[in-house]
Amino acid sequence: MSTTETLAAPSRIVAFPGDGVGGEVMTAALGVLDAVAEKFGRRFQVEDRQIGGAAIDAYGTPLRREDLEAARAADAVLLGAVGGPKWDDPHASMRPEQGLLRIRKGLGLFANLRPVAVSPALSAASPIKAEIVAGTDMLVVRELTGGIYFGRPSRQWRDRRGRAAVDTLRYREHEIARVTRLAFELAQGRRNKVTSVDKANVLSSSRLWRTMVSEIGCEYPTVELEHVLVDAMAMHLVRQPTRFDVVLTENMFGDILTDEASVLGGSIGLLPSASLGAPHANGRRPGLYEPIHGSAPDIAGLGRANPVGMILSVALALRYSLWLDREAMAVEQAVVDTLAAGMRTADLIGVGGPVSTEVIGDAIVRRILS
Ligand code: IPM
Ligand code: MG
């Protein structure tokens, strides 16, 4: 056998920088991936592809079928951000966000994991009092391929009574069951607590959600379960964030609550996410990794974006799709140490003034290599 045959095949990664600051944060994140390859002797084969507004401009569609297929064939998918004012016309037939929804649905990524942890170095950066946010460590598990984002009908029309619109919030049993089981399993590896969020006092879909989460909860007797209404949850998140471990939500509630939770740690720019599908028979698990921030068109191209959310998303890709836990921890530690050393992008305002996307990215790379 030749030497090349004995080397493990490279992991195949598809990178979709997308729009706005997506390209800048992706460049920083791929630099981190290179550092991991060098430090740990791994091989990653990265292929760049277009999604969102960039794909509309290049190909006239927010996600081409061949790009979806490439994502399906990859070991992990990285995504920057989609959207921007250029494509915001409410009458446009195509929107960048459709690319994101299409890839989530197309890859069957039913669970979106959004960890929100407040590092001690940053508890003072939060707009919420440091003593309230210190010690926050929760994992939001958001259902990602059902609910009002995908329900049909979804349309606008005009009739003799004027203009009207409808969206549909529909959930099927199996959609609730699979994300709920994952939330309980994840809680078992953490602090054994699940908080399920719904609006069961008003919505039928939430009543089914609550019933099923309670039923499935019985299969996990060591995990404590509580149900919280979404409006109350919005309040608890800022009053007592340390009370939560795993937070389970349907699609839209999770979208809204994670933007709220993101301020606990000082900036939405810090937060990563992993969107996971069911593992295949060969053990491979479809996964898409993206920061939870958007395309931030106001600062795009200025080198001011915080790449940490994207870099930590690479760490999640290493952990959940490539099964490289040691490498994932090295990236996370490098981020913690870099922030603890006082380095900050403009969203966090650092000691001695803000540094650029590139400077903080390079600092994280140096710590990985050291
Ligand atoms: C997110 C974003 C997306 C969502 C948009 C861009 C479609 O807000 O990932 O949180 O609503 O899911
Ligand atoms: Mg969102």
Image: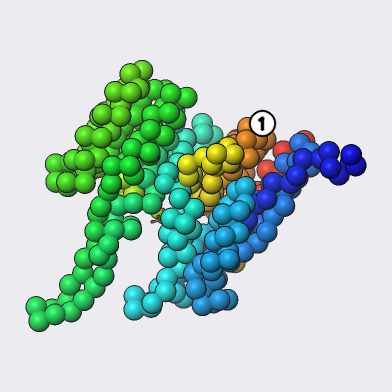
Q: Position of residue 227 (x, y in %)?
A: 24, 32
Quadrant position of residue 318: top right
Judged from this view, the residue extending furthest toward the top is 222
Residue at position x 39%, y 49% in the image: 144
Give the residue pinned by disc 1.
326
Disc 1 residue type? Arg
Residue at position x 74%, y 46% in the image: 10
Judged from this view, the residue extending furthest toward the left is 161
The quadrant of the image that shows the N terminus is top right
Q: Position of residue 61 (x, y in %)?
A: 49, 73
Residue at position x 34%, y 51% in the image: 146
* In the image: residue 369, left or right of residue 346: right
* Residue 214 showing in the rendered view: yes
* In the image: residue 290, left or right of residue 126: right
Residue at position x 33%, y 37% in the image: 177
Q: Position of residue 6 (x, y in %)?
A: 83, 38
Q: Assign a secondary structure to mark 1.
A: helix
* In the image: residue 103, left or right of residue 151: right
* In the image: residue 302, left or right of residue 225: right
The crowd level at tag 1 (other Cα within 10 Å; few <14, some 14-19, many 20+) is few
The quadrant of the image that shows the C terminus is top right
Front-most of residues 133 and 141: 141
Vertical position of residue 369 compared to residue 359: above or below: above
Vertical position of residue 28 compared to residue 183: above or below: below
Vertical position of residue 109 compared to residue 85: above or below: above
Vertical position of residue 323 compared to residue 299: above or below: above
Q: Position of residue 154 (x, y in %)?
A: 27, 66
Circle count:
1
